[in-house]
Image (cartoon, rainbow, N blue to C red):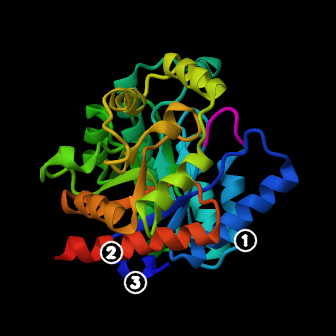
Amino acid sequence: MAVGSIRRSISVFATCPPSSGAASDGYRRQVVDIARWSEAAGCEGILIYTDNGLVDPWLVAQLVLTHTERLCPLVAVQPVYMHPYAIAKMVASLGFLYGRRAYLNMVAGGFKNDLNALNDPTPHDERYTRLVEYTSLVMDLLRGEAAITREGRYYRVTNLKMTPPLPPELLPGVFISGSSAAGLEAARVLGATAVQYPKPAAEYRGTPVGVSESGIRVGIIARSSGEKAWSVARERFPEDRKGQITHQLAMKVSDSVWHKQLAELSRARDDPERNPYWLFPFENYKTFCPYLVGSYECVADEVARYVTVGYRTFILDVPTSPEEMEHVGVVFERAARRAAS
């Protein structure tokens, strides 16, 4: 996979598998394998999820760092779980121990049941207001220019300084959900990469995405022919009635704007045989992002359209094999050439 050759214009991240339902030994092995596949494929980093039902993402990040040489963890950060000083300390400590950059995927929401269990009834938009204050404090601590005293609405610190200091070149990149107006505004204020769950590329019709740094979450299944790609896709994601019921229940306990947007798109989707944009895995609760399925040419055209309207960061779904990453690499090679021309 030649993603590395186009990294100047497009950043590609893989995704670490969630720990739910996995045995400990098998999960550790799976994380290490996928991290190594992703690094070999030239990915910039790997997204690591967080919620009440998963193992701690920072411990998974350390596992990734220990077993790779260049791959950067993109760690999901939920403010309800940790004080901003604890996040800054974690980033600085990993930078000190491994000399490698981390990325922060700042999470404002989650399942309502998770938030209720932690006694956090904060309304949706206010959570983004809090997230801006939280992230600003984390980044100011990591810049380490001076001791910080802050009297914020949500966080107060006095003469707080980060030790060990983080080298400037390891300052983390910040991602934030850009599916809602509140999320987009938070991304603008923070200068963060706004990550969205995209519509079919044709629906943007050349309209810029609206923020300077933008990315999307998307899965890709591509082969030399559309017929081969759809055969792989349907084998990997068969219909699952239990999953469909779980998906419907999850919709009822989530206030995430992206979740509702994808659900609307799934009801209005076109014939998948003629359109690479596929939401069937989402509908069956197998993943939380749309898929692009088809021939290399078809999927590369779709990716190039996303790049043209301003999406330059792609967070892929969990890889299934090194060979699958090679197929994805073909898509990005061709998409980069199309977008450049």
Nearest to the eye among marks 2 and 1: give it.
2
Report the residue marked by disc 1.
Answer: 66
Left/right of residue 41 with respect to residue 267 in the rendered view: right
Q: Nearer the viewer, residue 311 or 292?
A: 292
Q: Earlier in the sequence, mark 3 or mark 1?
A: 3
Residue 115 can be seen in this image: no
Is 31 on the left-hand or right-hand side of 304? Answer: right
Q: Residue at x 37, y 29 (%)?
A: 257
Q: Please give the range of residues in magenta.
A: 50-54
Along the line of sight, which residue is nearer the eye, 235 or 257? 235
Q: Identify residue type, mark 3.
A: Ser
Q: Circles 2 and 1: CB distance less than 8 Å?
A: no
Residue 276 tag number: none
Please tell me which of labels 2 and 1 falls first in the chain: 1
Q: Which one is nearer the viewer's eye here, 278 or 186?
A: 278
| SS for callout 3 | helix
Give the number of the mark in front: 3 or 1.
3
Q: Which residue is mark 2?
A: 334
Q: Position of residue 291 (x, y in %)?
A: 44, 49
Q: Secondary structure at mark 1?
A: helix
Q: Give the dominant element type of the magenta stretch: helix, strand or loop.
A: loop
Residue drawn at (79%, 62%), measured in percent from left and top? 29
Q: Which residue is mark 3?
A: 5
